[in-house]
Image (cartoon, grey):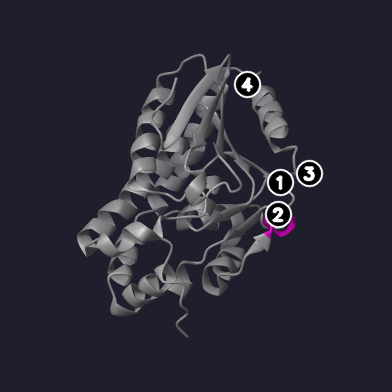
Amino acid sequence: MTDGPAASLTAEGPVARLTLERPQARNALSRAIADALDTALARLAAMEETRAVVVAGRGRSFCAGADIAEMPTLSPAEAEALSGRWQRIMDGFAALPQVTIAAVQGHALGGGLMLAIAQDLRVAEASARFGLPEVTLGFNPGYGIARLLDIAGGAHARDLMLTARVVDATEAHRMGLVTRVVPDGALEAAALALAHEVARAPRGGLAATKAITADLRAGRAGAEPRAYAALRAAPDAQARIAAFLNRRRIS
């Protein structure tokens, strides 16, 4: 079964695959992908035979982050609403009864990194790269900071957010961003093997364990969308977005 051109959802036995389908844009998170993920999450919640889901990106990169090309058209209110929507989508993965596994190749940047860490487990190719470049464009990550703090800890989270540096899979594993690192070319097989390993457990136990961790985190998120919207509307951020689109650099 498919959910349209922006993402596809297929299932075989107890394992499903949810794949971002914008390889020409390195799977940048567009409104179309948001629509497709909303649909996929609703379908997955109703798939009682599915116990594990591999979340992947078609092509050379898992996800390059937000679709910067859509940003200049957003008003502050629209930016806050979009950020809040993506926060709900990320939380939607945590709310699924299935165990979700990110399969990361190429780049997982900005919202792409947040999408990866929204999954319960994360498998990455050795050549994968991770980073949060938002500060270089003049604003904060729009969603997922609370989850990042939980997974990587305050020191690593601040390092990534404030320096905007890109780390390799080995360092990402040390930070906790990645669960397992596999050789290049072995990603799909490794992610599916892990999914089938997880899927041997009873669905009820998997769902209950996920629900407990989601409840513990629920009270910590919410400030990011407001700050993101305010900063993204500022003149400096507008100039940096325009420069990015025109491939110029602002000091």
Q: Is residue 204 left or right of residue 4?
A: right
Question: Residues in magenta?
Answer: 168-172
Q: Which residue is mark 1?
A: 125
**Where is mark 4, residue-wise?**
199
Residue appearing at x 44%, y 40% in the figure: 215
Label 2 vs label 1: CA separation?
7 Å
Residue 37 image offset from top left, x and y in percent: 40, 36
Tell me, yes or no, whether the two marked residues, 3 and 4, touch with CB atoms within 8 Å: no
Q: Secondary structure at mark 2?
A: helix
Nearer the camera: disc 4 or disc 2:
2
Q: Amino acid at mark 1?
A: Glu
Residue 171 found in image quarter: bottom right
- The residue under label 3 is 183
Label 3: state its secondary structure: loop
Q: Position of residue 133 (x, y in %)?
A: 51, 67
Q: Secondary structure at mark 1?
A: strand
Identify the image quadrant of the N terminus. top left
Q: Judge left or right: residue 101 versus residue 172.
A: left
